[in-house]
Image (tube, helix red, strand yellow):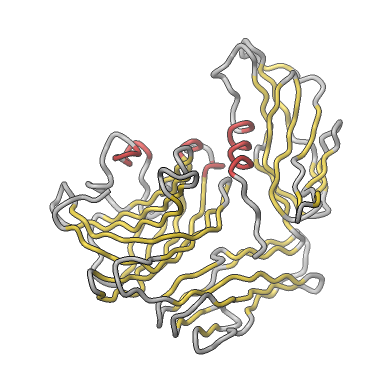
Amino acid sequence: MNRLPFAPLLVAGAALLGGCFNLSNPGVGALGLSPILDSMFVGDTLSPLTVTYVDADGVQKSPGAVKWFARVDSVGGVPAPIVTIDSVTGKIVGRRRGATLVFAEAQNLLTAALVVVSSRLDLTLLLDTVFVMPTDTITLPLAVVQRPGSPPSTEWFSPSPDASRYTIDTATGLVTAIQPGAALAYIAHAATRQDTVAETGAVVVMTLGSPSGGRYFASVLGISIRHEGGAATALNYRNTATGRLAFRLVDSIGSRTGPVFERLMVTLPDSVVGVGRFDIDTLNPQEAGASFGPLDAVCNPPRSWAVWSSGSQIAAFSHNPFALAAGEITVTQYQTIPGGAAISGRYTFTARRTDLYTDDLGKLTIRGSFVAPLVTYSTSCER
């Protein structure tokens, strides 16, 4: 699967070094780049980013001489820069598809910005892997980016490698799940008169026979970039304010005590007892509650909401100031199994990172699919 790479320090560095001045240490001064997130196409040239310097007294001054350099990325251990940058002028040239950091050094200070390089015709799978149960249907989401002035593109999909497991409409990407088994590839294509690209993902058709073994896959796009999957579980649990049952889907990777822990959680104020579509609303960090804030939006959800978090440093809450809903979660199947139920479905919502909550750079778009066991705790709130 070809996709934009992600390294935690890459994105965190762009946000922390370039996003704002470090005024917590005013005795040193601060350096900033603008914009901190920029994009270009392979072969194109990007003008130097703007460098701003604030001295130890908080006064903006000329940064003086600036030295520029770019992160050196590699493929198979061989140096293969995504961009090159003129060390004196700061002019950037896109070399290959990907995302990387460029750095500016001045006044004995260092700052960075994130540059994303796209091909002249770029195809991204918005769900590299989809998890479904038999008879589920899902249209595979794609994103196609073209260099301005390019001829129109056409998109299509290869036939299913095994039509007894899943079928696909090659024109629309509509998948119909049939029989459980190991992951099977799907291939998406895009072409113009000049360029042709293809990306490979996977379809996993599965069933659950007990309250364990749930799986999910999600993509997070924005200044944080993720394409990953892990364990999925769902609960109907007691809403401490109303006494009724609420619902929570938890998709996670790793553990709180391990070196890697990420969690994506969707909470509804009412239980899920069948198929349906449910809005995901905006919830700001102050309302979040439990481990996220002063109120308890987990055991007493004021409305439907969602959060994605990476470790203890990054969290993004469902957020859309321009619409009634930030997204939706759809339960496409509900089946009774020993010990509870099994559900499948998908979600799509926009979110805002808490560290960039008032900045448009903090906006994330999150999509996922899941097959999860659903158990009920009618007498307690299970966090």
Q: Is residue 161 left or right of residue 356?
A: right
* Image position of 361 with respect to 375: above or below: above
Q: Nearer the viewer, residue 82 or 215?
A: 215
Quadrant holding the N terminus = bottom right
State left or right for residue 280 relative to residue 253.
left
Image coordinates for residue 184, horizontal then vertical, percent: 55, 77
Residue occupying the point 78% across, 55% down: 96
Extreme-front residue of the structure: 258
The residue sitting at 28% across, 56% down in the picture is 268
Q: Which quadrant of the structure image shows residue 137?
A: bottom left
The number of numbered discs placed on residues in the rendered structure image is: 0
Instruction: Establish if 168 lies above or below 258.
Output: below
Give 248 or 262, whichever is nearer the viewer.
262
**Where does the image place residue 132, in percent across and percent down from the top left?**
43, 74
Please tell me which residue is depicted at 82% across the width and 44% down the height of the picture. 84
Q: Name the residue at 56% across, 66% down.
A: 128
Residue 141: image x %, image y %?
A: 55, 68
Q: Residue 39 placed where, x, y %? A: 70, 48
Q: Nearer the viewer, residue 181 or 103?
A: 181
Q: Is residue 347 left or right of residue 192?
A: left
> In the image, is 93 to the left or to the right of 341?
right
